[in-house]
Image: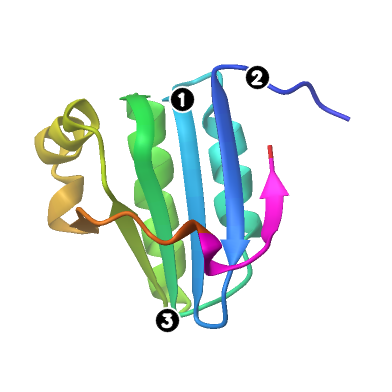
């Protein structure tokens, strides 16, 4: 059983056609593994929405994890959508160019989309 990092938390909710992942805290070299694990463990659906409204730090390691997740979902016929990034995180997405390849939307998904599947 691993230790929970108090700087980062991730929740996964599964709907019929959409998986909603909500990340909270800091995504950096110390916590990116938990995000990557949650994204890779999510069941296959046509859309995976990653709610970034609670993320205040997105490091280069986090950007690499999001780019890899985008490629992985696209290869499987799905789509990764980044939802509601904090202004600082939105700037990182713009500066790195990730927002040009991964769709970014402002609205936050309904938390009642389904039962929580994974919490790390």
* Rendered residue at 20%/53% (across/down): 106
Splitting the image into 4 quarters, where does residue 47 fall? bottom left
Name the disc covering residue 13, or none: none
* Rendered residue at 19%/58% (across/down): 101
| In the image: residue 92, left or right of residue 44 | left
Queried whether the magenta region covers residue 116, the answer comes back as: yes
Q: Are the residues tagged 2 and 1 within 8 Å (C-beta)?
A: yes
Does dot 3 land on a helix, a strand or a loop?
loop
Magenta residues, start to end = 112-119
Disc 3 crowd rating (10 Å Cα; few below 14, some 14-19, many 20+) is few
Splitting the image into 4 quarters, where does residue 60 fall? top left
| In the image: residue 24, left or right of residue 106 | right
Queried whether the magenta region covers residue 106, the answer comes back as: no
- The residue where tag 2 is placed is 5
Name the disc covering residue 77, or none: 3
Q: Is residue 107 above or below residue 8?
A: below
Q: Position of residue 94 (x, y in %)?
A: 11, 39
Q: Is residue 94 above or below residue 46?
A: above
| In the image: residue 39, left or right of residue 94 | right
- The residue where tag 1 is placed is 25
Reading the chain from its start, which is encountered first: label 2 or label 1?
A: 2
Q: Position of residue 92 (x, y in %)?
A: 19, 31
């Amino acid at each position: 059983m691993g230790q929970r990092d108090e700087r980062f938390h991730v929740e996964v909710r599964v709907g019929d056609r959409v998986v909603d992942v909500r990340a909270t805290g800091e995504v950096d070299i110390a916590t990116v593994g938990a995000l990557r694990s949650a994204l890779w463990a999510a069941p296959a659906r046509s859309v995976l929405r990653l709610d970034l409204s609670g993320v205040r730090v997105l490091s280069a390691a986090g950007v690499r994890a999001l780019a890899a997740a985008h490629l992985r979902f696209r290869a499987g016929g799905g789509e990764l959508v980044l939802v509601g990034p904090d202004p600082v995180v939105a700037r990182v997405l713009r500066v790195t160019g990730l927002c040009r390849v991964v769709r970014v939307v402002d609205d936050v998904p309904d938390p009642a989309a389904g039962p929580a599947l994974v919490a790390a």
